[in-house]
Image (cartoon, helix red, strand yellow):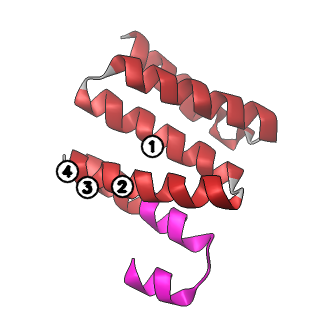
Amino acid sequence: MEELRRAGQLVDLPRGLLARAELRLLIKDLHGAENDLEESLDICSTSALRLLEAETHLGYTRLHLADGNSAASAAYLDRAHTLIEQTGYHRRTRDLADLKAALAS
């Protein structure tokens, strides 16, 4: 992450944080994943990076699913859905469906 910070490309840092958060979820480092998602959301929401903000909300949905918090997971999924609809970012429509199914099970 430090290399991305030094590069000064604002859009690259949330992408790196999201990738690391995904890895941390896979290895069950939920606290580390949450820290990465929090930093990504801070950057995205203050910099109008709405597509990456939607990605971050999807990440939070996965985090809370892994933690067993279905209420928080549903709330983040709703936020992601709203952003995806508002921006037309339908690349993540399948992710929305998969996560909605995971919440229902």
Which residue is found at the position 33% from the left and 28% from the top? 65
Which residue is found at the position 24% from the left and 31% from the top? 67
User: Which residue is identified by label 1?
Assistant: 59
Question: Of residues 87 and 92, which is closer to you in this image?
Answer: 87
Which residue is found at the position 58% from the left and 24% from the top? 78
Rounded to the nearest angstrom, the CA distance separating label 3 from label 2 is 7 Å
Residue 23 shown in magenta: no
Q: In the rendering, at what x and y percent does residue 20 appear?
A: 36, 62
Rounded to the nearest angstrom, the CA distance separating label 4 from label 3 is 5 Å
User: Which residue is identified by label 3?
Assistant: 32
Q: Are marks 4 and 3 in contact (CB under 8 Å)?
A: yes
Element under label 2? helix
Determine whether 9 is above or below 14 in the image: below
Query: Disc 1 vs disc 3: which is toward the camera?
Result: 3
Q: Earlier in the sequence, mark 1 or mark 4?
A: 4
Side of 97 where 86 appears, left or right? right
Specify the amino acid type for callout 3.
Gly
* Residue 21, label in figure: 2
User: Which residue is identified by label 4?
Assistant: 29
Q: Earlier in the sequence, mark 1 or mark 3?
A: 3
Q: Are marks 2 and 4 in contact (CB under 8 Å)?
A: no
User: Magenta span: helix, strand or loop, mainly?
Assistant: helix
Q: Which residues are magenta?
A: 1-18
Q: Are marks 3 and 2 in contact (CB under 8 Å)?
A: yes
